């Protein structure tokens, strides 16, 4: 992942949810190896913005583009998205879950499922059904998914939810490694994730009015 | 892309076969629905023989409707669908994979269970191969047409009922030609009429496989974005 | 002997019946025994892995997980 | 979630005594089962006369009748164990109930299938909606529903309670079904040819039938023990895994 001219740019974005204007006129740019932290009160549109970038939510106005990546693929295909929902199946085992996502997303030169589990300190739980995991362990598993398939852009919505201090530290290292490899992170968070040189984009409720 | 497709099909089959997946449930439902018919209309053998093809097909339709609503809903509820839709597979192929998995876990077992039910309904043994053949040809259409209904009702509370209402009218041609094939085989004519009905059934299935995923993907895009 | 297998002309029914019964019983026995073997070896492995630390063995089922 | 005393007992119970006892019982039980079944088969196939009316097909009876007997025995065991599980909350009771169901279902299926194989040559039809067959079919559905319920609820404590209620409801329902079907059936079709009474059994047939019934019953209880042991192990595996998920934080 050494595409150093990788660049995520949004211009004049607007978001309307349920007839309510959430934000408009939003522009930003993030380059390779950099992170953008979204802050702001509930309802300011942090999650909506992330979903718009991921292509999960319609962009009513303006545009968002990822340049310098794989020209064949859209943003969605070059991104990892971690939302509020973990997207895990209770009856699949931890290792099965990662194997599936690795096969589905296309592995490339990414870490093996076992290495990903190691990184998230889940290795002893590999053959347990997801149903037995605690909320924090589930979150760690959904973060481990990011390691089994290479994606230059990470879109993280409150990634540290349900994580204890040790796991937050692991997440920090994990994100730092991604940035060091030339990736981009856009994260919505209440917590200081200690990202080096991260730009902050503060969304407020007043932006709409 | 082929790898992603196969991985998704395998996952869906595995999930349906496991706890709470409802894989075996459709067959069980089919069994009960058909077995309850003689209790309603009486155990008169000629009457049952007359009703058998129709009842078997109606039971099959109802049983395959039963599991339809979970096709996309389960993934949408737990957030996996967001991740699936961001993968390398176009939504159309995701719909194909899910329809295919649905057919393997419901359609196929129903076809295999049908002859046993045919015995219960006094279906003449000569028509049994025709019944199975017709169902084998016709059931994929149910899954692929059903995918559109499942996609349209994604995110709807009690969507299963609504999906059934939406989809049933589209099942009518399958029902007509499916029953037609079995009845024609029962009458005889060296299977000429039955063969014709089977061809129609095959055409419907091919059309459903071609159009269903497009419709399902369009519906998913319209509703979820 | 041939007469025995002939079963007074009802061979197909009688032998299918016994064959089916044998198959069902064999499947049941096999499934039961293999399930026992699987579960007990799994339990052994897990107990060993726990290394005697987990003599308390059980954690209450989580309500929130389902 | 706070556990009641009974649940705690259940979750932590280590039914060591049952395991030790059943371990010692199993070998002699298997031997006795094989012996009785072997003797039964010998008499059923080689050493009993053909029936004067039904000819050689009467040999189907030696499988059919014991299967039907186990179909009912299985449900009785299941219902009884369910009642004990609900009332006394004994941890082994719902294991016993769960383990009886697949065996009962298999023999119910066998009773239906062998009945069908007997019906074809004797009555000229594979299936007839007469009272007895219909109620056995319903019994089969009850078994399937019971097993489906177990399969749907992951937590064994909750699954056990739901399944026990279902098993007991079914136990009450069976006589109701039985009599409603008799009434329903006679309304449409007077029982004439399709009576299962048959001729009174000759002593020469009573011996193989008795041996086969005894052999099947022994087989039932042997398998029941094996399955109960497997089920106990399954729960132990589940508990160990849950414990490991808790420890996984370390």
Image (cartoon, coloured by chain):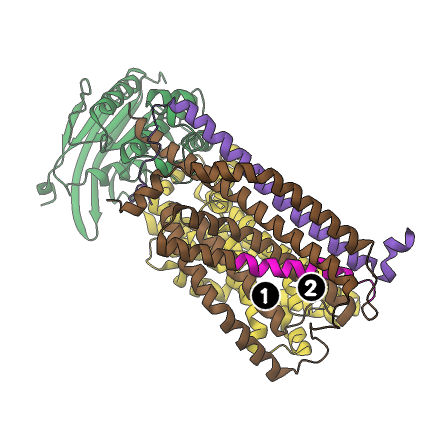
Count up the numbered dots: 2
**Residue positioned 83% across, 63% down in the render:** D50
**Residue positioned 65% across, 52% down in the render:** D216
Q: Colour of chain A?
A: green
Magenta stretch: includes residue D68:
yes
Instruction: Give whichever of A32, D1 is nearer the camera.
Output: D1
Could you say whether the residue bearing mark 1 is in a helix, strand or loop?
helix
From the rendered image, report the letter of the chain displayed in brown. Answer: D
Q: Horizontal and vertical percent for residue D73? A: 56, 58
Q: Which residue is mark 2?
A: D115
Could you say whether the residue bearing mark 2 is in a helix, strand or loop?
helix
- Tell me if residue D187 comes above or below residue D16 in the rendering: below
Chain of residue at mark 2: D
From the rendered image, report the letter of the chain displayed in purple. Answer: C
Q: Which residues are magenta?
A: D55-75
Residues marked 1 and 2, same chain: yes
In which quarter of the view is residue B166 placed? bottom left
Q: Which mark is residue B7?
A: none
From the rendered image, report the letter of the chain displayed in yellow. Answer: B
Q: Which residue is mark 1?
A: D136
Q: Is residue A63 left or right of residue D231?
A: left
Q: Horizontal and vertical percent for residue C54? A: 34, 27
Q: Horizontal and vertical percent for residue C21? A: 69, 52
Q: Residue furthest right?
A: C2
Q: Who comes first in sequence, dot 1 or dot 2?
A: 2
């Amino acid at each position: 992942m050494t595409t150093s001219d990788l660049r995520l740019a949004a211009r004049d974005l607007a978001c309307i949810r349920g007839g309510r204007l959430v934000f408009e006129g939003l522009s930003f740019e993030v380059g390779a190896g950099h992170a953008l932290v979204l802050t702001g009160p509930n309802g300011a549109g942090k999650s909506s913005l992330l979903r718009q970038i991921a292509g999960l939510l319609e962009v009513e106005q303006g545009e968002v583009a990822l340049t310098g990546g794989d020209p064949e693929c859209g943003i969605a295909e070059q991104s990892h998205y971690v939302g509020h929902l973990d997207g895990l199946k209770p009856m699949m085992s931890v290792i099965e879950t990662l194997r599936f996502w690795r096969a589905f997303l296309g592995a490339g030169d990414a870490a093996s499922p076992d290495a990903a589990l190691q990184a998230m300190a889940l290795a002893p739980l590999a053959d347990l059904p997801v149903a037995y995991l605690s909320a924090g362990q589930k979150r760690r598993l959904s973060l481990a998914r990011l390691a089994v398939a290479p994606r230059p852009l990470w879109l993280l919505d409150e990634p540290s939810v349900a994580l204890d201090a040790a796991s937050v530290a692991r997440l920090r290292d994990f994100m730092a490694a991604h940035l060091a490899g030339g990736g981009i992170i856009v994260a919505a968070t209440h917590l200081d994730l200690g990202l080096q040189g991260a730009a902050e984009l503060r969304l407020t409720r007043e932006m709409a009015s | 892309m082929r790898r992603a497709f196969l991985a998704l099909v395998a996952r869906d089959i595995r999930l349906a076969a496991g706890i709470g997946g409802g894989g075996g449930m459709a067959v069980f439902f089919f069994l009960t629905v058909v077995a309850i018919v003689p209790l309603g209309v009486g155990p008169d053998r000629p009457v049952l023989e007359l009703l058998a093809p129709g009842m078997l097909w109606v039971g099959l339709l109802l049983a395959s409707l039963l599991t339809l609503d979970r096709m996309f809903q389960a993934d949408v509820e737990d957030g996996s669908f967001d991740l699936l839709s961001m993968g390398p597979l176009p939504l159309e192929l995701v719909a194909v994979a899910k329809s295919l998995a649905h057919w393997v876990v419901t359609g196929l077992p129903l076809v295999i269970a049908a002859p046993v039910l045919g015995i219960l309904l006094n279906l003449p043994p000569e028509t049994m191969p025709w019944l199975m053949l017709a169902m084998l040809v016709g059931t994929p259409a149910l899954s692929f047409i059903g995918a559109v209904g499942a996609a349209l009702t994604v995110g709807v509370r009690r969507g299963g009922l609504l999906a059934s209402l939406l989809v049933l009218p589209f099942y009518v041609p399958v029902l007509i030609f499916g029953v037609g094939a079995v009845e024609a085989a029962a009458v005889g004519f060296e299977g000429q009429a039955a063969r014709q009905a089977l061809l129609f059934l095959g055409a419907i299935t091919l059309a459903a496989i071609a159009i269903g995923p497009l419709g399902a993907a369009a519906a998913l895009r319209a509703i979820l974005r | 002997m041939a007469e025995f297998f002939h079963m007074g002309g009802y061979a197909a029914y009688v032998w299918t019946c016994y064959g089916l019964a044998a198959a069902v019983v064999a499947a049941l026995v096999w499934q039961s025994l293999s399930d026992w073997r699987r579960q007990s070896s799994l339990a052994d492995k897990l107990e060993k892995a726990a290394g005697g630390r987990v003599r308390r063995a059980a954690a209450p089922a989580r309500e929130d997980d389902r | 979630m706070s556990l009641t005393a009974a649940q705690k007992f259940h979750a932590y119970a280590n039914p060591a005594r049952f395991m030790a006892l059943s371990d010692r019982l199993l070998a002699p039980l298997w031997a006795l089962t094989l012996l009785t079944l072997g003797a039964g088969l010998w008499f059923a196939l080689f050493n009993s006369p053909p029936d004067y009316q039904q000819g050689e097909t009467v040999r189907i009876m030696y499988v059919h009748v014991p299967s039907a007997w186990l179909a009912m025995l299985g449900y009785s065991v299941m219902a009884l164990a369910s009642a004990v599980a609900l009332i006394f909350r004994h941890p082994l009771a719902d294991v016993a109930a769960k383990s009886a169901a697949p065996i009962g279902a298999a023999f119910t299926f066998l009773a239906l299938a062998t009945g069908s194989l007997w019906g074809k040559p004797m009555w000229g039809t594979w299936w007839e909606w007469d009272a007895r067959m219909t109620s056995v079919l319903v019994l089969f559905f009850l078994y399937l529903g019971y097993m489906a319920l177990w399969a749907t609820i992951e937590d064994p404590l909750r699954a056990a309670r739901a399944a026990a209620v279902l098993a007991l409801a079914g136990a009450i329902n069976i006589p109701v079904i039985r009599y409603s079907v008799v009434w329903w059936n006679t309304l449409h079709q007077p029982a004439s040819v399709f009576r299962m009474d048959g001729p009174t059994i000759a002593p020469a047939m009573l011996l193989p039938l008795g041996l086969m019934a005894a052999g099947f019953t022994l087989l039932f209880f042997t398998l029941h023990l094996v399955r109960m042991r497997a089920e106990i192990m399954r729960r132990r595996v589940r508990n160990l895994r849950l414990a490991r998920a808790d420890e996984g934080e370390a």
